[in-house]
Image: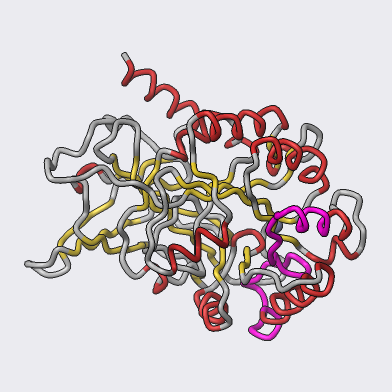
Amino acid sequence: MLLHSIKAVMRLVLSGLLFTASPLLPATDGNVTAPTGPLVVLLYHHVADDTPAVTSTPVAQFAAHLQYLSEHRFNVIALPEALAKLNQGESLPPKSVAITFDDGYQSIYDNAWPLLKQHQFPFTIFVTTEPIERRYSAMMTWQQLQEMQQQGVTLANHSVSHPHMIALTKDEFQTEVERAQAILQQKLGSTPAKLFAYPFGEYTKAQAQWLAEAGYHAFAQHSGPLSAASAPQGLPRFSLSGRYASLESLTLRLNTAAMPVLNQADYDPFHPRAPKQLEFDLKNPPFAMTQLNCFYQGKPIEQVTFAPKTPTSSIMRVTITLPSTPAAGRSRVNCTAPTTRQGHYYWHSIPMFVGPATQQWPD
Ligand SMILES: [Zn+2]
């Protein structure tokens, strides 16, 4: 009965995006231990009832999210603190969650902040500086951002002009990052944390490497919990806007653990030509491989194969054959497998930005 209702909720929430009829049963391997995902990072844009639905979380839904985190005693942690701990190899308390907002919309100040204050939850806003400089009415003002910073809100870098980064030259990319960082420093009067969120979540491996050398952590927008194995300049977040704004959607995402995927920073999400296959390596997979399911465009992928890298290796190479050729633009493959806790999943998302990259890159 319980199983059925969980299944029903999952199907409803995901609209077939992630799960098929795979049974929600614990892995059959008796040796596995229940994992804890070290950090789930939530991503919001607008918190309002009258802004574009696809990037908005209704105010009542947002309030319900915070209430849920509070009632279920999640450890809502400031992003710089969480990343510093993971960097030093420290594990985070169970049920750690960080809250982030991209762009810097007025509704964060008007609607989200009062609710966050009630719960005393820390959070981070990734700010795009140019729309604020231009005083667009949908955006917060520098004065409001300063006020938030003085009360402990983390403000971080989301570029100057919110371009499609993968269409930029190396110099243009660096200028977007460095200028935004300098403007934040100047306007806010203190050195901002070295945190960057890619506009649209899009990036190339070369850009991630430049950010690594410059000392930044960087967030994208593919889904999944974050662990010490995540690429530090390709960190996942769960978006909770639009069709993902429901409380069921939140609880599903909170019930995830990072899949132990190796060498994630080696993957280049930018594909000049559409890929036919994707691969990743799992170290000592903590679930039965037959329970791994991968999904593309809302449908399960039939051709997911796996084999040890060498006959004696504990590393399992997973090969995913895409069912159709990805069009130019942004898409992703999500893979899940059950943990030993009912309704709890390992989750790994693979972003794909398929070229050619142009200034007319699709939003
Ligand atoms: Zn943005």
Residue 210 percent location from the top left of the image: 56, 81
Left or right: 121 with respect to 17? right
Left or right: 256 with respect to 304? right
For the C terminus, the image quarter is: bottom right
Q: Residue furthest bottom?
A: 171
Relative height, residue 24 to residue 332 (above, below): above
x 53%, y 83%: residue: 213
For the N terminus, the image quarter is: top left
Relative height, residue 31 to residue 343 (above, below): below
| Residue 248 is inside the magenta segment | no
Quadrant hosting residue 339? top left
x 69%, y 70%: residue: 192
- Determine the quadrant in which ligand 1 lies: bottom right
x 80%, y 45%: residue: 109
Q: Residue furthest left?
A: 312
Left or right: 159 with respect to 183? left
Residue 262 percent location from the top left of the image: 31, 66
